[in-house]
Image (cartoon, grey):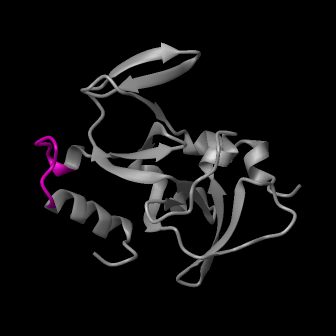
Amino acid sequence: MSKRLNLHEFQQHLTDRPQERDLPVAQASTLLVRIAGENWLVDMADIGEVLPLPQLAVVPFTKPWFRGVANVRGNLYGVADMAAYRHNGAASGDTDNRILLLAERYAFNAALLVDCVLGLRDTRNWRQDEVDGQTEYYDERGEPWRKLDVRGLLEQAEFLQIGV
């Protein structure tokens, strides 16, 4: 597998290898990621591409969760460390880390740094409970998952203000 994969190639790779469940490809619409040891769900419509963590240009006088700027095929993306943003540690920077480039529909050149990508799944039949005002999802093994609200994240003034 090449060092960089666009989202289509990543999806194709995941569908070509044996799946844990026999799900039709069209049903796998949620990306499972880990952020600071917690399980998160990201709607595929919110992501334009998934990439290994590239070399970042550090930007001075920014908040600790803003890791820097990545050059992806000539386009610059601000990279936010989601663990640090949530005040829950920081991404390690190892080879499992990935950046999720936000979908073009948001018109933000932003990328979310996550610990690792766990795969694509259909979560429509997962059990849901309301916990502290947030919907929590539970997979077949009973493990809890939260949904990352990308639109809501982009509406947060704190996320949009990277300067200290």
Horizontally, is 27 left or right of 93 in the view?
left
Which residue is found at the position 22% from the left and 43% from the top? 27
Where is residue 125? Give x, y as percent. 25, 26
Residue 89 lies, with reference to residue 14, above or below; the image says: above
Which residue is found at the position 45% from the left and 23% from the top? 136
Where is residue 151? Give x, y as percent. 59, 44
Q: How many marks?
A: 0
Horizontally, is 83 left or right of 29 in the view?
right
Q: Which residues are magenta?
A: 17-25
Q: Foreground residue, 97 or 30?
A: 97
Where is residue 56? Give x, y as percent. 64, 73
Where, quadrant-wise, is the C terminus in this rendering?
A: bottom right
- The single residue placed furthest to the bottom in the displayed view is 74
Which residue is found at the position 52% from the left and 39% from the top? 148
Examine the structure image and report whether residue 21 is included in the region drawn in magenta: yes
Which residue is found at the position 52% from the left and 15% from the top? 131
- Magenta stretch: dominant SS? loop
Q: Classify residue 93 by image quadrant.
A: bottom right
Residue 126 lies, with reference to residue 94, above or below; the image says: above
Examine the structure image and report whether residue 3 is included in the region drawn in magenta: no
Horizontally, is 142 left or right of 113 in the view?
left
Where, quadrant-wise, is the N terminus in this rendering?
A: bottom left
Q: Foreground residue, 71 or 93?
A: 93
Residue 34 lies, with reference to residue 80, above or below; the image says: above
Where is residue 162? Give x, y as percent. 80, 56
